[in-house]
Amino acid sequence: MGILIAIGLPVLAALSIGVFRLKRWVFTLSFISALGSVASLYTQVSLNQVYTRSWMPNMLIDLSFMADGLSLFFGYVVSVMGCFILFYAKHYLPKVSDSNPRFYAYILLFMSAMLGTLFSNNLLLLFIFWELTGVISFLLIGFNTHTEKGRIGSRMAFIVTATTGLILLVGVLLLGILYQTFDISLISRMPALDNTVWSTLAFSFILIGVIGKSAQFPLHFWLPNAMAAPTPVSAYLHSAAMVKLGVFLVARCYPILSSLDYWYVVGIIGLITMVVGAVLALLTYDLKGILAYTTVSQLGYLIGFYGLGGSTGVEHDFFHILNHVLYKGSLFMVAGIVIHAFHTQDIRKMGNAFSAMPLAAIACVVSAASMAGIPGTTGFLSKELMLAHMLHHPNYPILIGALVVSASCLVATAFRLCLHIFLPSKTTKPVESQSVFFQLPPFILAMATLIIGLFPKSVTHFLSQASVAGLHIANPHTVSLWHGITPELIISLCITLSGIIIYTVFQSFQWRATVPGILQLDAGFNRGITGLSCLSKWLNRRFLVDSIRAHISIVLVFFVALMAPLLFALSPSIQISNISIVYLPLLIITGTAAIIVSMSKKWHVKLIALSVVGLLVSFVFFLYRAPDLVLTQLLIEIVSLVLLLLFFKKFSTMKRKKDHAVHDRSGLSFLKALVSIGVGGIVFVLIQVVNRPSADNPIGQFFIENTRPLAGGSNAVNTILVDFRGFDTLGEISVLFIAMVGVMGLLWNKRS
Amino acid sequence: MSDLNLIVSIIASLFVSVGIYLVLHRSVINILMGLGLLTHATNLLILVMSGSPIGKSAPIVLDSGAQVYVDPLPQALILTAIVIGFGVTAFMVVFFYRLVKENQRTEVNES
């Protein structure tokens, strides 16, 4: 139940904000519900607790939630960070604004969706929550609906994450079929998957979902574009919560998928992303863009870590994640304060900000130090652990090389952040000082970075309690600040030095380099989106014509073109007998009459020919032993003739002032003839294909046998109409009635 | 496929061709006639599905012992179709009559 309370409280608060259109106390309500969520996780949820309620049993979807170490750890991260973000947002948002309640409601809904994803015990439920986070992030990124950047950024983020999410669904379904269940706690107790085509496919689809959600290369481009969001959103979604979902899913699937041959692909993608993100962070001058690229890099670091994992499991993964959440959340919040003060996101126009925001400056220095891996911070420990992990890997030169490159770039970026924003500068004026409460959340996070960095055992003890069977190894090494002069420490030193060198080099270039065109994948993405709409406009212009006749012709041409190959493939099975002379006159007379109908210019000739056609049809009915049809057809033919004569007489005497009296060009006539002959030919072949002697047991036999015993009549056609299918005949009478009403309406309604 | 069925299917597809050709015209008289021909074609198409009638008798069950009858179901369907077809024709004729009267022309507007 505790899980349900944790997920449900924020939803309730968000709904009440929306339904009652609250204007005041919105922040208090949101903050209390978020705190309540944390509290219920802490007091009501214990490890390995499962809550199941049947929902759609036929589709194997249950409302099933489970708390294991992994979900509980992520759950705490998400809910505690949610509280920080809410507090920060209160000071970030304008004091009075109509859209503030909407913002809080979205954040709370997002928090619930995140918690739902984390605690889902059913793969399909997990997918539903996964997509919900995408939908809400779309609303949050595009929160500033009046800016074009916001709209484009949210559209891009949504298209990328939703599309890859759908691919993930295919992978999840495959996984469910392979295991015969979607229950995660059951699956995790079953043996890992063997290397088959299906398991590899499931793995690749899930990996694509991870790549999209966690902004891995080559889909990393949506994250910097999502920075159009308000900064609290960036700090929450794009550092602590949503982008971590990919990492979470990798960890979730680790026990069952890591034994696959291709698992190392996860590591490769992660490491490539790590390097690309770190390098790109150097090439941009947008403050939030820099942070976004470092986030991309760090996500690659985390996913790559799982990708390199050993056969028995990994260790200290939670420590790496915690490290990133602490320092990146803090940095984003500092960035928000800085942007608030400078009214620009361009880091080249900043400087001299220390006196205005001392707490934020300290937070920034500590967090940047953590990003750079300076001793005394969690970042240092994380990097040391990672280096130790990599040194044991058979391919360690490449791995270490990748890590050195990316970490050096991050060191340079960290220096740039601290020095360019806070050091005195001649070009910028001092900015107004910011409120202490505004600076408090990043400061607390930075202090946590520092304390855990200095006394890691205070936290690793709790983290090791949350270990998950299959994911973590049994007895992890202890984490300590000082463990002698090891290769890791020497490499760390080299990283710091080369980072300083990179910083000085870029400083001498005045940071003029920009992202190379080949890596501007977002521009290509936008071009593709625009191209799609251009293509559809072009297609519309070509094929959506105003003229009804042209429209019908296009439909018919496609009918012929699509049916012809199919029928051609079926045609060999048709046997055509010789035509006996007896029926030839029938064919000749009917054909002549039909052609006269189409060719004649005079309407009365056409009418006579049409009557001849009708009479010949009734003759065909006679040949087919259908006396009722013959009678009906004759009657109807006579009535129709009278009707047509009545009205055509009026047509011809009416003044046709506005008739164009132009005939279609001969080319157009020829085209019309071609289309109609094509359709006729298709219909002919269709009849031959359909009419193969196949039906051994036609339903008509039933009517023949039962017409006397059941309906008490000898004429089977009559009994079908009035007895067996009496309601159809009622429908027929209704149609006639409707037609009659329509005719009367048309004749009586005489305007003028 | 028996030769009667073949002949009738040729006739039906001929009606389809001519009907489509007429429907693609601009004048309402031609469109009306084309629709009529298409109705005939459809009826014949259903009729052909009842198989060759040769050697069978009409589906009127008399006491005179076992006989082979033609399938009564297509006939019942066609009977319904003929009547509904008449309703549609009547409506269309009056509809076009009104159209021509209001617009002073016997051609369908092209835009």
Image: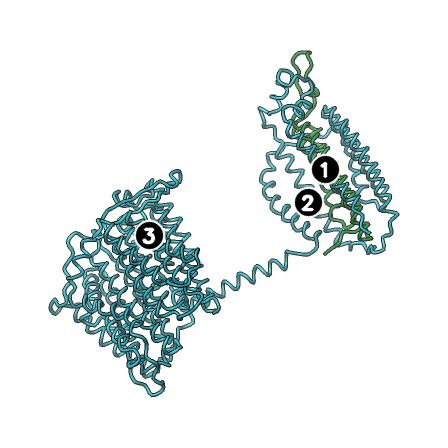
Chain colours: A cyan, B green
| 2 and 3 marks on the same chain | yes
- Of all chains, the one bearing label 3 is A
- Report if residue A269 is visible in the image: no
Dot 1 alpha-carbon crowd within 10 angstroms: few under 14, some 14 to 19, many 20 or more: many
Label 3 – label 1 distance at C-alpha: 63 Å
Query: From the viewer's perspective, is A226 left or right of A710?
Result: left
The residue that mark 1 highlights is: B39
Do the CB atoms of the residues marked 3 and 1 lie less than 8 Å apart?
no
What's under tag 3, amino acid-wise? Ile
The residue that mark 3 highlights is: A7
Q: Quadrant of residue A510?
A: bottom left
What's under tag 2, amino acid-wise? Gly
- Of all chains, the one bearing label 1 is B
Q: Position of residue A731 (x, y in %)?
A: 66, 33
| 3 and 1 marks on the same chain | no
Q: Position of residue A495 (x, y in %)?
A: 23, 73
**Residue at the spot x=79%, y=51% of the render?**
B107
> Judging from the image, what secondary structure is the residue with disc 1 in?
helix
**Residue at the spot x=77%, y=28% of the render?**
A619
Q: Position of residue A264 (x, y in %)?
A: 29, 56
Query: From the viewer's perspective, is B5 left or right of A748?
Result: left
- In the rendered view, tell whether residue A438 sits above or below residue A620: below
A531 vs A342, nearest the viewer: A342
Q: Position of residue A308 (x, y in %)?
A: 25, 58
Q: Earlier in the sequence, mark 2 or mark 3?
A: 3
Nearer to us of marks 2 and 3 is 3
The residue that mark 2 highlights is: A678
- Report if residue A165 is visible in the image: yes
- Of all chains, the one bearing label 2 is A
The numbered disc on residue A299 is none
What's under tag 1, amino acid-wise? Thr
Label 2 – label 3 distance at C-alpha: 63 Å
